[in-house]
Image (cartoon, rainbow, N blue to C red):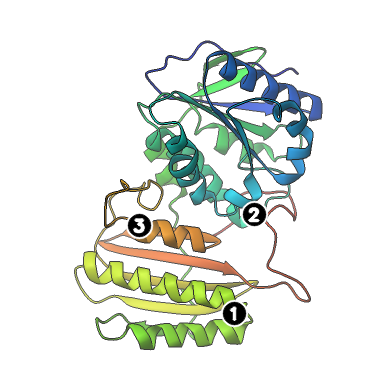
Amino acid sequence: MTGAAGPPVPSSGLHHDALLYDHDLGYRDAIRDFVAAGRAAGEPVLVAVPGHRLALVRPLLDPLDEVECADMAVIGRNPATIIPAVLDGFARRFPGRPLRFVGESLWPGRRPAAYRHCVEHEAMINLGFAGQPFTARCLFDRIRLPADTLADVTAAHPWLCSGGAARPNPGYRPPRAVLDRLAVPLPPPPDDALTVPVTPDGFAALRTAVAAVASTAGLAAERVDDLRIVVTELASNALTHGTGQSAARCWAAAGELVCEVTGPGELADPMAGRVPPAPTSVRGRGLLLVQRLGDLVDIRVADGTTTVRVRLDLPAPGGSAADPAEGRLVGPAPL
């Protein structure tokens, strides 16, 4: 298989396609051709692939101007941070210009817990960049990713690229249809989870309580500090936007520390926490910060209630927190 730049993309709108590769040569060619087409059109390009893949493609890209590389296992450790990283960093360095992005958000070895979040991310590209002059190509391993995983993630792409051309995807599902399908109920907290009412004068006690749970579970000290920030932001949002009494909960699970805030009120915008506010805005950064600090973040709205659940990886025995670039093949996994 050889990669392809596809047909010319109008500068007036989004083009978002998926390309399934079979081997390293096809992977490298796909990126090379896509980047070359962008540079020929005068478009800045961002290439974001997992670190072990950067060594394969960086020699093709280093001599090129306005081509940037990023380790997807870093900027996309939490898949919800990929869009703000592109919008807040790359796009703002080239204001008003058509942009090109090639990425691999879901790869063999990414932990199964990230599966739904990667599919959500791909669907939200269609919302976050709608109407913008943005060309995105997403690469997926046809051989080593399970067939049902490929079906789910490619359904979030309006276009498929193969055989040297991009064509409309007959299996494409609109973003909200994809998001609705993924929004399965979260498992309930355990009976022994710490539960603290969210009150205007209870922030200090709340931070102390969740920090104690996290420290007992073995969360690193700097991540305990991150958790304090997370629960403060979530509690503040609940008081500001909620319509009644909210509660914070915290518990340790297998390999992770979980903290959530649940309360009445509905978070209607699926892009909340993914689109940076205007630089002059004094609001709108709370969920962005929560997404940046959490390893995975689930947001559920049901029956007039919103739950934001944040997961932070606990250190593996004798080592650091789990690396999402390692592990078994990704596939559908319960949240």
Of residues 37 and 153, the one nearer the viewer is 37
For the point 59% across and 79% down, the residue is 221
Residue 185 seen anywhere in this rendered image of the structure: no
For the point 56% across and 61% down, the residue is 295
Disc 1 marks which residue? 221
Residue 323 seen anywhere in this rendered image of the structure: yes
Contact, CB < 8 Å: mark 2 with mark 1?
no
Disc 3 marks which residue? 285
Local packing at callout 2 (Cα closer than 10 Å; few below 14, some 14-19, many 20+) is many
Q: Amino acid at mark 3?
A: Arg
Q: Amino acid at mark 2?
A: Pro
Disc assigned to residue 112 = 2
Contact, CB < 8 Å: mark 2 with mark 3?
no
Q: Amino acid at mark 1?
A: Ala
Residue 275 x/y as whole percent: 38, 46
Q: Nearer the viewer, mark 2 or mark 3?
A: 3
Q: Nearer the viewer, mark 2 or mark 1?
A: 1
